[in-house]
Amino acid sequence: LFGLVVNNLVKSMSTQSGKNVNIEVKDGVAVVRIDQPDSKVNVLSQSLMSEFEQIFNRVFEDPNISSAVLISAKPGCFIAGADVNMLNAAGTAEKVAEISSVGQAMIQKLEDCPKPIVAAIMGSCLGGGLEVALGCHYRVAVKDPKTILGAPEVMLGLLPGGGGTQRLPKLVGLPDSLDMMLTGKNIRADKAKKMGLVDMLVSPLGPGLAEPAPNTLRYLEEVSVQVARDLANKKLKVDRSRKWTSMPGLMYKITTETGFGQNYVFKKARETVMKKSLGLYPAPLKILDVAKVGVEKGGAEGYQAESQGFGELGGSSESKALMSLFFGQTECKKNRFGKPKKDIKTVAVLGAGLMGAGIGHVSLEKGYNVILKDNFEQGLIRGQDQIYKGL
């Protein structure tokens, strides 16, 4: 009876569940799974951040936990960004800035943890989700077209408000970080690895006893748990130093760590922004200003400038208009016709021109088989080439 009580006590201590997050300890490695109910994606809401704090307090304080893995229970999404509704509810610039400060503090706590934390990324890792991953000590991602990393805040008239404007330049260099933040474009896992945004790639698995996506997610977790264990045991050491002797290292040193290189990059970036926007959108210019503060004056002032800039942009008419557009687009994507009577596995596209090839490309990325037809063989070849280049 005593043995049964002890076993049950140990089992209850090794698992802990909340509404959005649960934790399971595997031989000293805490696997923290994010799974927001009744949603296809995970977003950084106030309730999720509150649970994060409770879970990671345990990770920090429990002597039986040596490292942690942060992973989503949803195969298609790590964290898709922050909950935009929080900004609408905030009202004033001061309240919006406070949201940024709270997010910064939470992610800083991850970064300051003496125990290694590994971000296991499958699916979309965007906005606040990317900033959470940046706060972790190591990043493992699935090499798959559906795994994307990005900082799309500029598309909502905002800037990355969870420390992204400060951590990205240090990690990938000034040119690549500004390109990500000013365009909002998505970065695929293989490119993210080359940039230094991701430390390790795992290949997706095919079907087995389960569908490919759940299989791959389990494999990602297994690999990440071993990585976390190796980091804790000092078997794996992270060296992100750039050497002058390599061309990538030389370019990083010049553009990110020298005054004249930094000035040149900021000057060219500002010229590009003004040429494309005519100065009509405040977000790209504010991103440049905030990143420059961090580069020139250091983290403390950079984070303060980031939260203040986030608050200013969150209350701007441009941001409110872009958010309204975002909500409209989201509403239009909803299926109002119910579930199809038959599963659609193949899409046929007539015409292999720019539009047809684009439809074919998007359909392939969604997992459909694609039949591409055109009246002319040369047109068909061009369409195929366009699709292959985009994959």
Image (cartoon, rainbow, N blue to C red):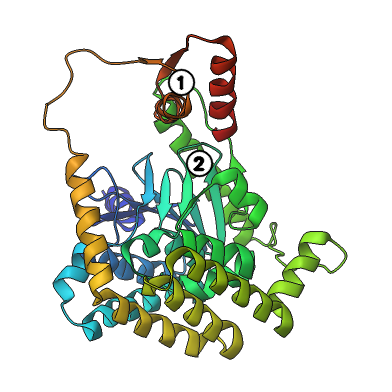
Determine the image quadrant of residue 258: bottom right
Taking depth in this image into account, of 82 and 184 the one nearest to the observer is 184
Number of labels in the image equals 2
* Residue receiving disc 1: 207
Left or right of 385 in this view: 181: left
> How much space separates mark 1 and mark 2, taking CA atoms?
15 Å
Q: Residue at x 40, y 26 (%)?
A: 363
Q: Earlier in the sequence, mark 1 or mark 2?
A: 1
Point 14% across, 71% down: residue = 89
The front one of 374 and 325 is 374
What secondary structure is found at the residue carrying circle 2?
helix
Q: Which quadrant of the structure image shows residue 317?
A: bottom left
Q: Is residue 313 left or right of residue 221?
A: left
Task: Kindly check if marks 1 and 2 are in contact, taking CB atoms under 8 A apart as contact.
Answer: no
Residue in the picture at 47% in, 24% down: 353
Coordinates of residue 45 in the picture (x, y in percent): 24, 63
Q: Which residue is mark 2?
A: 220
Tag 1's secondary structure? loop
Tag 1: amino acid: Pro
The residue under label 2 is which amino acid type? Leu
User: Relative to 1, does residue 374 appear above or below in the rendering?
Assistant: above
Q: Is residue 285 visible?
A: yes
Residue 220, percent from left and from top = 50, 41
Give the farthest residue toward the right: 245
Residue 231, above or below 214: below
**Which image quarter is the C terminus in?**
top right
